[in-house]
C-alpha cells in the first residue's frame, strides 16, 4: 500500500529472534512439561540422612522436594512446587522456602503459607530414612 512503510528485513528478523525470549518468563511459572515431575511419582532417594540437621531443612531442587527434621529427629517432606502458580521453588532461607516467581513463602517444616500470593499449603509427601539415605515418595 502506498503511504504505509513496510517492515524492513532487519525489523522482521529482530522480531523473530526476540519472540522465543518473551515466553521464557511464562515457562518458569508453569508446573507442567519437561524436567522433574511436580512431586515424586515413586520413592526417590534424595541424599544422606545426615544432610538434614535437627531443626533444619534441605531443598532437593532436582526432585522438587524439601525435607525438614524436627528436634526429635523425625523427618517431614513436601513438594517444593509453589501452590500459587506452579513454579519450582529454588531458594531455602533457613526453614523458609521462597518462590522466585511471585514471592510466596512457605514454612519448610509444616508446608504452611507464610506469605501470599499463595494461599494453599505445600503438598505433603511421605519420607523415611532407609540405610542412611532419605527416601521420599508420593503422598500416602
Image (tube, rainbow, N blue to C red):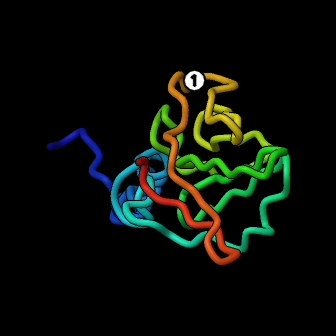
Q: Is residue 28 left or right of residue 74?
A: left
Q: Where residue 96 appears, x then y in whole percent?
A: 76, 39
Res. 94 in view: no
The residue under label 1 is: 117
Residue 49, placed above or below residue 88: below
Residue beneath the point at 50% across and 26% down = 120
Q: Where residue 132 appears, x then y in whole percent?
A: 70, 75
Question: Considering the numbered disc 1 on the image, is that residue within a helix, a strand or a loop?
Answer: loop
Residue beneath the point at 64% across and 52% down = 66
Q: Nearer the viewer, residue 140 or 115?
A: 140
Q: Residue furthest bottom?
A: 131
The quarter of the displayed image where residue 114 is located: top right
Q: Nearer the viewer, residue 83 or 46?
A: 46
Number of numbered discs: 1
Quadrant where the image shows the N terminus:
top left
Q: Where residue 93 appears, x then y in whole percent?
A: 81, 45
The quarter of the displayed image where residue 52 is located: bottom right
Residue beneath the point at 60% across and 60% down = 128
Residue beneath the point at 50% across and 49% down = 125
Res. 106 in view: yes
The quarter of the displayed image where residue 19 is located: bottom left
Amino acid at each position: 500500500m502506498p503511504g504505509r512503510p513496510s517492515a524492513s528485513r532487519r525489523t522482521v528478523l529482530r522480531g523473530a529472534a526476540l519472540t522465543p525470549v518473551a515466553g521464557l518468563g511464562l515457562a518458569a511459572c508453569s508446573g507442567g512439561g519437561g524436567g522433574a515431575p511436580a512431586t515424586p511419582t515413586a520413592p526417590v532417594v534424595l541424599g544422606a540422612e545426615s544432610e538434614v540437621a535437627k531443626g533444619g531443612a534441605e531443598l532437593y531442587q532436582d526432585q522438587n522436594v524439601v525435607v525438614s527434621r524436627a528436634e526429635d529427629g523425625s523427618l517431614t517432606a513436601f513438594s517444593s512446587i509453589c501452590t500459587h502458580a506452579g513454579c519450582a521453588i529454588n531458594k531455602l532461607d533457613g526453614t523458609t522456602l521462597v518462590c522466585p516467581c511471585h514471592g510466596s513463602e512457605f514454612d519448610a517444616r509444616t508446608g504452611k503459607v507464610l506469605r501470599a500470593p499463595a494461599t494453599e499449603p505445600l503438598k505433603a509427601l511421605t519420607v523415611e530414612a532407609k540405610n542412611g539415605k532419605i527416601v521420599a515418595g508420593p503422598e500416602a
